[in-house]
Every structure is written in C-alpha cells, then in structure tokens.
Amino acid sequence: MKPPKFAYHAPQSLTEALQTLAGVGDEAVLLAGGQSLLPLLNMRLASPAHVVDLGRVPGLDDIRVTNGHAEVGAMVTHRRMEVDPLIAHAVPLAQKAAGYVGFRAIRNRGTVGGSVAHADPAAEWPLVLLTLDGEIELTSANGSRTIRADDFFESVYSTAKRSDEVVTSVRFGTRFERNWGFWEFQRRTGDFATVAVAVACVVEGGSVTEARVGIAGAAEKPVRCTTAEQALLAGSTSAASEAAAAAQDAVDPYDDVHGSSSYRKRLVFAATKRAATQALGHHYGVLDHA
Ligand SMILES: Cc1cc2nc3c(=O)[nH]c(=O)nc-3n(C[C@H](O)[C@H](O)[C@H](O)COP(=O)(O)OP(=O)(O)OC[C@H]3O[C@@H](n4cnc5c(N)ncnc54)[C@H](O)[C@@H]3O)c2cc1C
C-alpha cells in the first residue's frame, strides 16, 4: 500500500523544524522513526498535507544523567535505551522495558520521543515515564515547557502536546535505581503488551518511603494505582500480594481480541505481584533481576 500525497520537509535544525510546524499548523505531522506513522500513512489512516522529518535535526539524541534525572533526547532509539551504559546504570527499569518494545528491527528505528507522542496505551515508554515520575519537554517556536508524565497522557493516542510542539526530550527519575520491577505479558514476542506493570520504590532505613505502581494495557492510557502504592508503603510481609490485589480491584479493563476484561484483571494481579516482588526482593536481597 502507498501513502497519500504530502509535502515532505527535511529541516536541518530544530529552529527550522519549529518554524515549519508553526507555518503549516494542524496540517503537519512529524516523522521520527516512522514505525507507527508509516503504517498509518500506508493504510491511509492518516492523510497529513505535510510531513516534517526530524531525522536530520541535530541535538535530539543525547543521553545525560543530571540532578536526579536521566534526560533522553526524543530521537534516541529504543535499541539505544536497551544497550546504553548510562541508562543501565541510572534507570535499569528503562533498560529492561526497552527490550520489550517490538522487534529488534523496530527498536533500531523507533524512538522514545515518537512513542511518547504517539501514546499507545500499551506502549512501554509512557508506562515507564509515569512510573519513574518522569517529565516530557515540549518545544515550539514560542519556547519550551515541561509536563509531568502524570499530566501528559490523556487517552488513546492523545496527549497534552499541541500540534505546533515537538517532544524534544524526556526525563526519567533516577532515585528508583535499586528498587524496581517490571513484568509484561505479550501474546507473542514483539507484540504490544497485553498488560505490563512497572513498580518503582525508594527504600530508606529498611522502610519503603516512596512507591509508584504503573499499569499499561488496562485502560485508555497508562495509569498509576495509588491503592497498590499504599500497600507497598504499609510494608507488611505480604505487601506484594496486597498490592496485586489492590491493582486488580482498581482496574476496569476493556475487552478486545487479545483478552477479556476479566482476563486482563487477572493479568494485572499476576504482573503486579511479580513486579512488586522484584522491587522489594531486590532490596531485601531475596531476588535479583535476571
Ligand atoms: C510491528 C510493530 C510492533 C510494535 N511493537 C511495539 C511495542 O511492543 N511497544 C511499543 O511501545 N511500541 C511498539 N511499536 C511502535 C514503535 O515503538 C514506534 O517506534 C513508536 O510507537 C513510535 O516511534 P517512532 O519514532 O517510530 O515515531 P513515528 O512513527 O515517526 O511517529 C509516531 C507519531 O509520533 C509523532 N512524533 C514522532 N516524534 C515526535 C516528536 N519528537 N515530537 C512530537 N511528535 C512526534 C509523529 O508525528 C506521529 O504522530 C511497534 C511498531 C510496529 C510496527
């Protein structure tokens, strides 16, 4: 299948890209790795008048760790997240999740910024950003703003980003580097998650002082489960099971061809229990991350 006709723009700088976007308005889409956009164009599910390619824009592929955050440029690929030593050290949860994004060929081209902007409810990066208290930096011709992941994802393929804005970077909180867990169920390797759960904790003096539990695949966007977080903070010996039960009770998943609502609820239980056990077990030395 072939895409509809569009005007192709290949800006050589971010300023040029932003000016182009400001000039053509809602008629434009950005092209990053193309792993979601090109299928949409080829199947004629999107018909933009303009495509603005970020592929030649310098400065969007840095990774640095500063002030409690790992800052990742929008054009960093999923594959680089999987192998970068800074990511492995500062945000090992992100490294783990990267390996679940599609297939190697998709990870080689698809980008973190593209995934965040696309906002598939079962995608890994929105889930990991939400769980690691992440932020998204958006830049337009009028300047930059930063939005917390909690406020950025609105619904299926819908975010707080305006059409004149580019996702320029994302920031993952690094304070969870010791106590984290991630568990995902895919029907086949490379598929989107049916359900994925990420857990991130801060443990001080033997107590869990901060807990974040994120769930993907059970709602129209990734969601945090505060009742599961409270169970982890309470710190009983069966905290992981209590968190899992709380998460299962909290979600009201949709039915689709991959699973019924009740099946997804049971997956949420299993995924939360495993991810929470990993997060706490790492602290207590019971389990280690394979
Ligand atoms: C077979 C298959 C399996 C996949 N499996 C998974 C999976 O398991 N998990 C997963 O998370 N993803 C999966 N994906 C999607 C993949 O991760 C994409 O890479 C990702 O969704 C989009 O990133 P991209 O760089 O390819 O963006 P593109 O396809 O280029 O763009 C996607 C959308 O984001 C916008 N956009 C891109 N970059 C920016 C930016 N910097 N600022 C603002 N808007 C921007 C575009 O305009 C477009 O609307 C899969 C894709 C395929 C084809």
Image: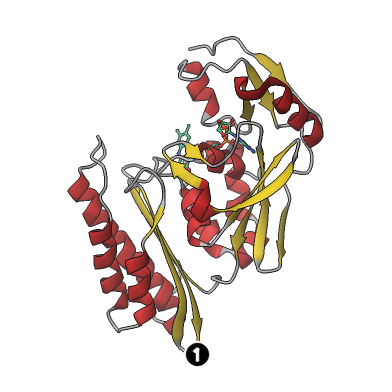
Instruction: Please tell me whether residue 15 is drawn above or below residue 264 in the rendered image.
Output: above
- In the image, taking residue 172 as reference, residue 8 lies left or right, namely right
Foreground residue among 276 and 120: 120
Please state the horizontal and vertical placement of residue 5, each as a whole percent of the image.
59, 9
Residue extending furthest toward the bottom: 205
Q: Residue at label 1?
A: 205
Quarter of the view holding residue 246? bottom left
Q: Residue drawn at (34%, 42%), measured in percent from left and top?
A: 188
Foreground residue among 146 and 231: 146
Foreground residue among 189 and 179: 179
Please state the horizontal and vertical placement of residue 112, each as a whole percent of the image.
59, 45
- In the image, taking residue 222 as reference, residue 83 lies left or right, namely right
Please state the horizontal and vertical placement of residue 21, each as a whole percent of the image.
70, 27
Q: Residue drawn at (50%, 90%), measured in percent from left and top?
A: 205
Quarter of the view holding residue 113? top right
Residue 99, visible in the rendered structure: no
Label 1 crowd bin: few (<14), some (14–19), many (20+), radius 10 Å:
few
**Element under label 1?**
loop
Q: Residue drawn at (80%, 34%), measured in percent from left and top?
A: 15
Looking at the image, how many numbered discs can be counted on the residues?
A: 1
